[in-house]
Image (tube, grey):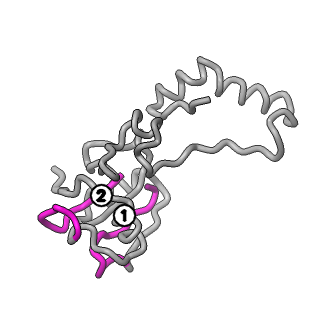
C-alpha cells in the first residue's frame, strides 16, 4: 500500500526540488514527508536529503525506489505509471495523454528516433522502417504498447 500524499506541484517548486533548494512537502498541502511524482531519475524531496539524489537507469528501478522511499520524487514515462506511486499534477494539469497532447502537462518528453542525415537520405530499410512506424498499423502498435502516438 502506498503512503504518498503529494498530489500536485507547480513548475517553480518542481525546479527548486530538482535543484535541491526547496523541500517539496514543506511547501505544499502535504501533511507528511511522503511525496512522489511520475523520470528515469529520482531524488528526495526533503532539501536536507536531496544531496543523495540518484540517477537510475531503468523505469522499474525508479518506480521501486520512489514507492519504497518516503519523500522521494521520480520521473517516468506515462505508460509506466502504475498503482505503486502517484502521478502528480503539474500547474493544475493531471498527467494524462490528453493533457500531454494538448501541451498543458508541461513535464514531458518525446521518444526520439535518430538518423545521420535526413530520412530521405537513408537506405531503403531505414526509409521502410520510418514509413511503417508512421503508418496506421505502426501507430496502433505504439498505442497498444501504452505510448502516445506522435501527432503530425
Query: What residue is disc 2 on?
Result: 9
Q: Residue 53 in the image: x percent, y percent?
A: 40, 72
**Where does the image place residue 55, in percent across and percent down from the top left?**
46, 66
Q: Which mark is residue 14?
A: 1
Is mark 2 in CB contact (under 8 Å) with mark 1?
Answer: yes
Residue at position x 30%, y 65% in the image = 72
Please tell me which residue is depicted at 39% across the width and 43% down the height of the picture.
80
Locate residue 3: give its quadrant: bottom left
Residue 124 figure quarter: top right
Residue 63 spot, x, y in % from top left: 35, 53
Q: Main secondary structure of the magenta part?
A: loop
Instruction: Choose between 70 and 7: the one closer to the eye.
Output: 7
Q: Is residue 54 left or right of residue 137?
A: left
Which residue is located at x 49 percent, y 59 percent? 57
13 relative to 78, above or below: below
Residue at the farthest top position: 136
* For residue 54, above or below residue 101: below
Amino acid at each position: 500500500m502506498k503512503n504518498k500524499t503529494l498530489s500536485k506541484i507547480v513548475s517553480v517548486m518542481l525546479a527548486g526540488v530538482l535543484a535541491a533548494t526547496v523541500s517539496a512537502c514543506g511547501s505544499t498541502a502535504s501533511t507528511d514527508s511522503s511525496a512522489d511524482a511520475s523520470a528515469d531519475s529520482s531524488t528526495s524531496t526533503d532539501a536536507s536529503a536531496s544531496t543523495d539524489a540518484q540517477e537510475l537507469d531503468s523505469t522499474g528501478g525508479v518506480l521501486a525506489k520512489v514507492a519504497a522511499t518516503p519523500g522521494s520524487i521520480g520521473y517516468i514515462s506515462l505508460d509506466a505509471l502504475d498503482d505503486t506511486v502517484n502521478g502528480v499534477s503539474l500547474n493544475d494539469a493531471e498527467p494524462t495523454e490528453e493533457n500531454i497532447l494538448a501541451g498543458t502537462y508541461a513535464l514531458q518528453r518525446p521518444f526520439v528516433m535518430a538518423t545521420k542525415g535526413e530520412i530521405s537520405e537513408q537506405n531503403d530499410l531505414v526509409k521502410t522502417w520510418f514509413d511503417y512506424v508512421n503508418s496506421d498499423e505502426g501507430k496502433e502498435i505504439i498505442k497498444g504498447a501504452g505510448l502516445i502516438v506522435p501527432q503530425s
